[in-house]
Image: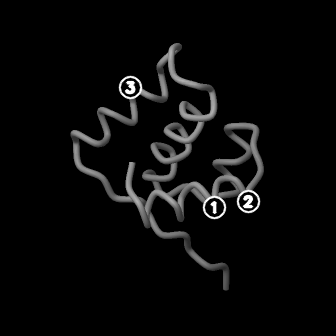
């Protein structure tokens, strides 16, 4: 049975910050990518699906998801 990844939780204020980072042209690309990963992970998509959608590795998605859950935005 496949393991289900934990869904990152955030309030509306944090979501607004993440959306701003994800769509920003002034933030570093890595910061924008992290925000896109977290916003996408909130929709219960698997790490594999998120990686395919964003063109990154499954390892990166899992690492960013775990880090956000542990530390926040």
23 to 63, vertically: above or below: above
Look at the numbered discs 3 and 1 and tell me whether their residues touch, using CB distance below 8 Å.
no
Quarter of the image where the N terminus is located: bottom right
Numbered badge on residue 71: none
Look at the numbered discs 2 and 3 and tell me whether their residues touch, using CB distance below 8 Å.
no
Q: Which residue is mark 1?
A: 62
- In the figure, is residue 58 to the left or right of 71? right
Q: Which residue is mark 2?
A: 59
Residue occupying image coordinates x 67% and y 51%: 49
For mark 3, give the secondary structure: helix
Question: Which of the two residues, 58 or 72, is positioned nearer the viewer here?
Answer: 72
47 to 40, vertically: above or below: below
> Residue 20: image x %, image y %?
38, 25
Residue occupying image coordinates x 73% and y 59%: 59
> Residue 45: image x %, image y %?
55, 55
Look at the numbered discs 1 and 2 and tell me whether their residues touch, using CB distance below 8 Å.
yes
Question: In terms of sequence position, does the residue under pointer 2 or pointer 3 come before the other?
Answer: 3
Q: Which residue is mark 3?
A: 20
Question: Which of the two residues, 47 or 61, is positioned nearer the viewer here?
Answer: 61
Residue occupying image coordinates x 49% and y 29%: 22
Residue occupying image coordinates x 41% and y 61%: 71
Task: Tell me which corner region of the image, top left, top right, bottom left or bottom right, holds residue 28.
Answer: top right
For mark 2, give the secondary structure: helix
Q: CA distance from mark 3 to mark 1?
A: 22 Å
Residue lying at the far top in this picture: please name it.
Answer: 25
- In the figure, is residue 49 to the left or right of 66? right
Q: CA distance from mark 2 to mark 3?
A: 24 Å
Q: Local crowd at mark 2 within 10 Å, few (<14), some, or many (≥20)?
A: few
Q: Local crowd at mark 1 within 10 Å, few (<14), some, or many (≥20)?
A: many
Task: Tell me which corner region of the image, top left, top right, bottom left or bottom right, holds residue 8.
Answer: bottom left
């Amino acid at each position: 049975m496949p393991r289900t990844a934990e869904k990152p939780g955030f309030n509306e204020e944090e979501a607004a910050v993440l959306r701003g980072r994800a769509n920003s042209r002034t933030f570093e690309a890595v910061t924008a990518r992290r925000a896109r990963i977290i916003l996408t992970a909130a929709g219960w998509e698997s790490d594999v699906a998120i990686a395919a959608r964003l063109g990154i590795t499954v390892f990166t998605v899992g690492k960013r998801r775990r880090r956000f859950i542990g530390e926040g935005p």
